[in-house]
Image: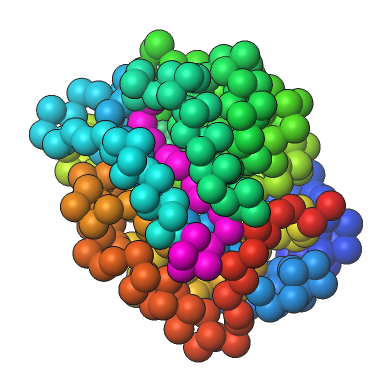
């Protein structure tokens, strides 16, 4: 680490802000020493707000049916080899009950943009979960919807919404998505969600095709400005049935470096160590936590559908029962000196 980079790092640690070119420089000149320096600072600032607690969210993958055709995604509509499924309302409620029985106080319902899940269907589902478990937070991750729809879901009891922006650069966005999808609508959704009072999560893939350091610097700036309550970042991993099948995956090392930067830019953000990170390295999620992440999202989906929710190749945690997944995570977290927190774990404002 040169003295110039050391100064940049110190400014970031102190001011939670750098210029775009400075973020780019920090990323491009990273080495083991600067990564360790930023990770230590990220861990220290996280500790100030969240102690050594790692929040656990139960993830239910409610459907892999999707009307969209994102070029990187294994469940894109044009993947004819994908075996489609949709959980019934009973199955979803049973997964939520199981999560609650295992002590979790957040359920995340994620899925493709499946037309079956109208506002009426979702509102009823949210109301039922909230009626059964009033002390649970309900998080949705169901893609782009109208402002009216987001408002109704909020009204029904949804607390949080995850919608990765995917890339903060409109041209890069256009490369990764088909023409009928738009950067502007993605951003409109994020603004509406925040405006409606959701704890809102954005995020992006690290190492997605065509991604440059400039794009990453823009992503960090976007996070700085948007101030999401949550931010999901994980390595891009190719899926064999997409046009990016032979593209290289994103690296664990760069993902961890960016986790540290994001923690420093936005100290209280809820930052998951993602399943994609765990897929790329046997200790990927631990490395993420040690770089500044503080959320884990064990899978509560019925074991029978887990392999079908295949966003990318070789996804981990598709074989074990939910209880086993949670136990495994608790052991891993304790091994690195952290503690599982199963409470709602809201953004600390
Ligand atoms: N349909 C919903 C949620 C499901 S996709 C939505 O659009 O928000 C959830 C996230 O998985 C996406 O936002 C994307 O960033 C990530 N993802 C998709 N394909 C991936 C891949 N090949 N590698 C890594 N992450 C991927």
Residue, x 69% and y 41% (percent of image)?
Answer: 199
The quadrant of the picture occupied by the N terminus is bottom right
Where is residue 180 drawn, in percent x and y?
Answer: 40, 11
User: Is 307 left, or right, of 330 in this rendering?
Assistant: left
Does 129 appear above or below 97? Answer: above
Q: Which residues are magenta?
A: 100-113
Residue, x 58% and y 58% (percent of image)?
Answer: 105
Does any portion of residue 244 appear in the rendered image?
no
- Which quadrant would residue 55 be assigned to in this image? bottom right
Q: Residue furthest right?
A: 15
Does any portion of residue 349 appear in the rendered image?
yes
Of residue 157 and residue 18, the one placed in the foreground of this image is: 157
User: Is 54 left, or right, of 178 in this rendering?
Assistant: right
Instruction: Residue 53: say if magenta.
Output: no
Where is residue 177 drawn, in percent x and y?
Answer: 39, 23
Of residue 62 and residue 297, the one placed in the foreground of this image is: 62
Residue, x 29% and y 62% (percent of image)?
Answer: 316
Where is residue 309 drawn, in percent x and y?
Answer: 27, 44
Residue, x 25% and y 24% (percent of image)?
Answer: 77
Of residue 106 and residue 171, the one placed in the foreground of this image is: 106
Does 330 appear above or below 303? Answer: below
Of residue 246 and residue 272, the one placed in the foreground of this image is: 272
């Amino acid at each position: 680490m040169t003295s110039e980079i050391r100064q940049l790092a110190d400014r970031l640690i102190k001011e939670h802000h750098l210029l775009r070119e400075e973020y780019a420089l920090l990323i491009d000149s990273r080495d083991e020493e600067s990564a360790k320096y930023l990770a230590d600072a990220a861990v220290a600032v996280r500790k100030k707000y969240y102690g050594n607690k790692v929040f656990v969210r139960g993830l239910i993958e409610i459907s892999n049916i999707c009307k969209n055709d994102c070029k990187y995604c294994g469940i894109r509509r044009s993947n004819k080899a994908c075996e489609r499924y949709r959980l019934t309302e009973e199955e979803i409620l049973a997964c939520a009950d199981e999560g609650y029985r295992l002590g979790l106080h957040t359920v995340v319902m994620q899925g493709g943009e499946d037309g079956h899940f109208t506002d009426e269907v979702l509102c009823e589902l949210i109301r039922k979960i909230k009626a059964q478990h009033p002390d649970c937070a309900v998080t949705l991750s169901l893609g782009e919807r109208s402002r009216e729809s987001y408002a109704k879901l909020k009204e029904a009891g949804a607390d949080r919404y995850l919608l990765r922006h995917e890339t903060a650069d409109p041209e890069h966005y256009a490369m990764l998505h088909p023409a009928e999808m738009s950067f502007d609508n993605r951003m409109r959704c994020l603004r509406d969600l925040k405006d409606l009072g959701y704890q809102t999560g954005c995020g992006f893939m690290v190492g997605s095709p065509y991604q440059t350091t400039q794009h990453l610097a823009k992503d960090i700036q976007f996070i700085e400005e948007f101030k999401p309550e949550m931010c999901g970042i994980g390595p891009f991993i190719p899926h064999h049935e997409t046009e990016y099948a032979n593209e290289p995956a994103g690296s664990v090392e760069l993902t961890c470096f960016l986790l540290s930067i994001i923690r420093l830019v936005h100290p209280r953000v809820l930052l998951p160590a993602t399943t994609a990170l765990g897929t790329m390295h046997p200790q990927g999620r631990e490395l993420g936590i040690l770089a500044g992440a503080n959320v884990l999202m064990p899978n509560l989906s019925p074991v029978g559908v887990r392999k079908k929710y295949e966003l990318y190749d070789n996804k981990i945690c598709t074989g074990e029962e939910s209880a086993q997944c949670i136990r495994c995570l608790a052991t891993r977290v304790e091994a690195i000196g952290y503690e599982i927190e199963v409470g709602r774990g809201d953004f600390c404002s």
